[in-house]
Image: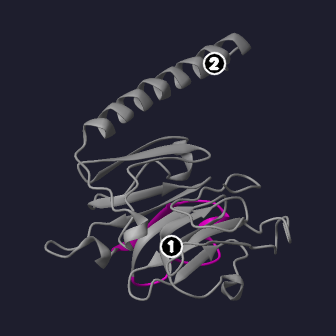
Amino acid sequence: EPLTEAGKQTKMQRFWLVALVLSALAIAAVAQTEAQVYHAGSGLAYENLFSAGGRHTCFINSSKLLCWGDCELNNCFPPSDDFFSVSAGYWHTCALKLPAEGLPAEAGGDIVCWGSGYALQESVPPKGKAVAINAGFAHTCAVMAADRSLRCWGYKVDESEVPGGKFAAVVSAGNRQTCAVRLEDSAAVCFTLSEGGPSWEGELDPPGGQFASVACGGGHCC
């Protein structure tokens, strides 16, 4: 029997109540999880235990991933491997596996992505291990462990637009823009993947100085 308007509203209220309870439990679990955070300034790896995307949320507890939200696009079914960092995009999620036992954090972890949408249809993650990863609206970027290069993939991504050089374990992907922190001088480097999306040419020039962290939203970065 089709739901009435009141029934639909009640169902939606129950959904958000469950999501709120799960979020509270996740935050509590993360707070109780013993975790070593590797500072980007030291040139090591970056650990992200909790990430909220456009349609879902994921967190890592004792190296295991748990995701919830809009499960119709496979966002809520992460692999069973052990991870040290996770980033939820709009329709997709990417995470970094724990380094092999005995290896230091800067050895990085294998990149694993799942979900749906444009972010996974046009290109695949690079081979190799990464020390930091961040999923945007329809693209993802990672700092590779071997040479500290920045690699990006996803919808309409042209890697020739990605700046070269070595980067600290700090990167953030927004709508079509991305910012990272250069390893040699801690300067912020920002660029836009303009094809297929808005262009912020001239508007993404970050201020001078040294940075320890960076975060990009829909059309801005801080």
Where on the picture, by quarter, is residue 179?
bottom right
In this rendered view, identify the residue nearer to me: 93 or 71.
93
Residue in view at x 47 percent, y 73 percent: 168
Q: Residue 1 at x, y = what percent?
A: 63, 18
In this rendered view, identify the residue nearer to me: 136 or 34.
34
Name the amino acid, label 2.
Glu
Q: Decide which of tag 2 and tag 1 comes sooner along the chain.
A: 2
In what element is the residue under mark 1?
strand
Residue in view at x 51 percent, y 61 percent: 212
Q: Residues within 10 Å of mark 2 (few under 14, many from 20)?
A: few
Name the amino acid, label 1.
Ala
211 inside magenta stretch:
no
* Residue picked out by circle 1: 142
Q: For this view, does 81 lie left or right of residue 68?
A: left
Q: For this view, does 79 lie left or right of residue 200?
A: left
Nearer the observer: mark 2 or 1; the answer is: 1
Tally of numbered tags: 2
* Mark 2 to mark 1 CA distance (whole Å): 48 Å
Q: Magenta segment, which residues?
A: 109-128
In what element is the residue under mark 2?
loop
Q: Residue 161 at x, y = what percent?
A: 72, 83
* Residue picked out by circle 2: 1
Q: Residue 3 at x, y = what percent?
A: 66, 18
